[in-house]
Image: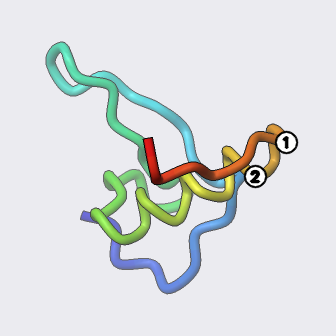
């Protein structure tokens, strides 16, 4: 798991882990932990211009 204090939107790449796509930090090469992955997803949705709807 990535232990970097800050992970920015443009520092994340996706790699295959078996048949699963995993977001990884480009600088350290480790997969993002749950908290970082949630933050990344929110930043990504915001940058695309979609509303973040958790009420679905």
Nearer to me, 18 or 44: 44
- Residue 27, quarter of picture: bottom right
Q: Are marks 1 and 2 in contact (CB under 8 Å)?
A: yes
Callout 2: 10 Å neighbours few (<14), some, many (20+)? few
- Quarter in which the N terminus is drawn: bottom left
Outermost residue, bottom side: 5
Report the residue at 41% width, 57% height from top: 37
Distance, label 1 to label 2, CA atoms, is 5 Å
The coloring applied to the image is rainbow
Report the residue at 47% width, 53% height from top: 54
| Image coords of residue 31 (percent x, y) | 32, 52
- Quarter in which the C terminus is drawn: top left
The tag on residue 32 is none
Which residue bears the numbered disc 1? 49
The image shows residue 7, relative to residue 27, as above or below, that is: below
Outermost residue, left side: 18
Report the residue at 33% width, 36% height from top: 22
| Image coords of residue 25 (percent x, y) | 49, 54
| Image coords of residue 11 (percent x, y) | 65, 54
* Horizontal relation, residue 4 to residue 35: left or right: right
Which residue bears the numbered disc 2? 46
* Horizontal relation, residue 36 to residue 17: left or right: right
| Image coords of residue 38 (percent x, y) | 43, 60
Q: Determine whether the residue tagged by mark 1 lies in a helix, strand or loop.
A: loop
Q: Determine whether the residue tagged by mark 2 lies in a helix, strand or loop.
A: helix
Outermost residue, top side: 19
The image shows residue 43, relative to residue 4, as above or below, that is: above
* Horizontal relation, residue 10 to residue 55: left or right: right
Report the residue at 49% width, 85% height from top: 5
């Amino acid at each position: 798991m990535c232990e970097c204090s800050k992970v920015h939107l443009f520092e994340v790449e996706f790699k295959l882990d078996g048949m699963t796509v995993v977001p990884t930090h480009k600088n350290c090469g480790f997969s993002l932990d749950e908290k970082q992955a949630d933050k990344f997803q929110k930043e990504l949705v915001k940058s695309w211009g979609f509303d973040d709807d958790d009420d679905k």
